[in-house]
Image: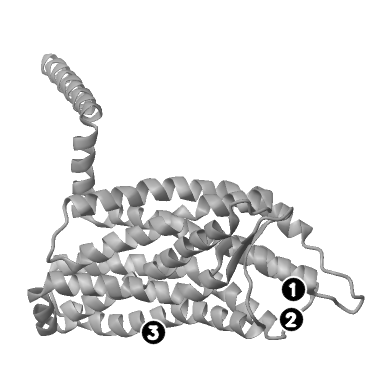
């Protein structure tokens, strides 16, 4: 995945290097005009909403962290992954609006690193959550062994997941180059077409095939086991995870499909200008849908997690006591008004 710079890179490379039967370059002005208006606005909205939501999640989980709860550790790192991802959006928004990269080569690599680490971090921590629920539900004895060494095991697993994320991100980070020219670019410059195809396949395998395989297997074992249990807490945890995973796939699968289409294009299939133009527009839409996923996890926690909701309200009361004291005053006034009105109605009824 190479985000907005993927679409810019892909379109720039393809439209201006492709020659058809008439040996004229493809024209991507329509795609560029669309992205200049459409992407900066949506990226800005996603950035603001996601920053507030995920920032609140991090604060709440850090404040009320429970060492024995692997779920909280995964949720914390999931929110951290989303924040890393979000940090890159203002830069891509500016890039889309101006069509010029002005931040230099170092920032190009840094922003790409934030983007890629956020993307792979989200995937790997969702996989870790799934495997943890699988062990807790299906192999309770194994999970008890890990619980006895919860702190050391938790730290080791978190570091391992971030190391995996960095390893998966490194090729794109290394190949990304920022050029401060009259039309400055931030784009991967692959040594050859094989590297491009390998990275596209890596995105599809790690971004879709691997998560689907692991989660499909785990939940095929978890659901029958849960059906025989009567624990409400476990049901709620599984429900939260299922919603998180389903939403993730709904928002990221279209993007992975488009990435696979680019793979086919660079493999020598469907090389017409019309195909590439349609693919560019599809990338703009699917990319924006995928980016907006960063905003949704905190909303899901709020709707499905009673404990999380309680902790958020408790934290907000500590941060903004004046607002909540005013709310209590208004509530008490409303309660008094209702009771007075009910009293009047009762008196009137008695006299009638």
Dot 3 surroundings within 10 Å: few (below 14), some, or many (20 or more)? few
Please indicate, yes or no, whether residue 230 appears anywhere in the rendered image.
no
Give x and y (percent) for residue 219: 29, 80
Provide the residue designation for mark 2: 270
Give x and y (percent) for residue 348: 16, 15
Residue at (25, 85) in percent of width and height: 221
Task: Single out the residue that lies furthest toward the left.
Answer: 148
Decide which of 202, 304 is in the foreground and name it: 202
The answer to which quarter of the image holds residue 318 is: top left
Quadrant that contains the C terminus: top left
Left or right of 254? Residue 82 is left
Q: Disc 3 to disc 2, how far (Cα)?
A: 29 Å
Left or right of 188? Residue 110 is left
Provide the residue designation for mark 3: 213
Q: Is residue 43 above or below residue 3?
A: above
Decide which of 245, 30 is in the foreground and name it: 30
The answer to which quarter of the image holds residue 275 is: bottom right
Q: Are marks 2 and 1 in contact (CB under 8 Å)?
A: yes
Task: Single out the residue that lies furthest toward the right.
Answer: 22
Q: How many marks on residues?
A: 3
For mark 1, give the secondary structure. helix
Residue at (10, 75) in percent of width and height: 149
Decide which of 348, 281 is in the foreground and name it: 281
Please indicate, yes or no, whether residue 247 appears anywhere in the rendered image.
yes
């Amino acid at each position: 995945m190479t985000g907005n710079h993927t679409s810019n890179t892909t379109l720039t490379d393809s439209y201006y290097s492709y020659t058809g039967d008439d040996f004229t370059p493809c024209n991507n002005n329509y795609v560029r005009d669309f992205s200049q208006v459409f992407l900066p606005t949506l990226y800005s909205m996603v950035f603001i909403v996601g920053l507030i939501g995920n920032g609140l999640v991090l604060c709440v989980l850090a404040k009320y962290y429970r060492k024995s709860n692997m779920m909280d550790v995964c949720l914390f790192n999931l929110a951290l992954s989303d924040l890393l991802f979000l940090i890159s959006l203002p830069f891509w928004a500016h890039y889309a609006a101006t069509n010029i990269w002005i931040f230099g080569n170092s920032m190009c690599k840094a922003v790409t690193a934030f983007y890629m680490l956020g993307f792979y971090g989200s995937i790997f921590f969702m996989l870790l959550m799934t495997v943890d629920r699988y062990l807790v539900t299906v192999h309770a004895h194994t999970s008890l062994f890990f619980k006895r060494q919860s702190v050391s095991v938790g730290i080791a697993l978190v570091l391992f997941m971030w190391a995996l994320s960095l390893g998966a991100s490194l090729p794109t980070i290394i190949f990304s180059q920022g050029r401060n020219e009259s039309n400055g670019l931030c784009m991967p410059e692959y040594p050859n077409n094989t590297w491009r195809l390998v990275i596209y396949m890596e995105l599809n395998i790690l971004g879709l095939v691997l998560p689907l395989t692991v989660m499909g297997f785990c939940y095929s074992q978890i659901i029958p086991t849960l059906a025989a249990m009567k624990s409400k807490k476990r049901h709620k945890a599984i429900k939260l995870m299922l919603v998180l995973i389903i939403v993730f796939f709904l928002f990221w699968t279209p993007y992975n499909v488009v990435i696979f289409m680019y793979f086919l294009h660079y493999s020598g299939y469907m090389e017409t200008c019309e195909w590439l133009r349609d693919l560019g527009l599809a990338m703009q839409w699917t990319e924006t849908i995928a980016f907006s996923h960063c905003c949704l996890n905190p909303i899901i926690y709020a709707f499905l997690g009673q404990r999380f909701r309680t902790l958020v309200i408790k934290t907000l009361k500590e941060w903004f006591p004046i607002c909540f004291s005013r709310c209590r005053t208004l509530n008490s006034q409303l309660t008094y008004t209702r009771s007075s009105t009910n009293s009047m109605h009762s008196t009137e009824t008695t006299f009638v």
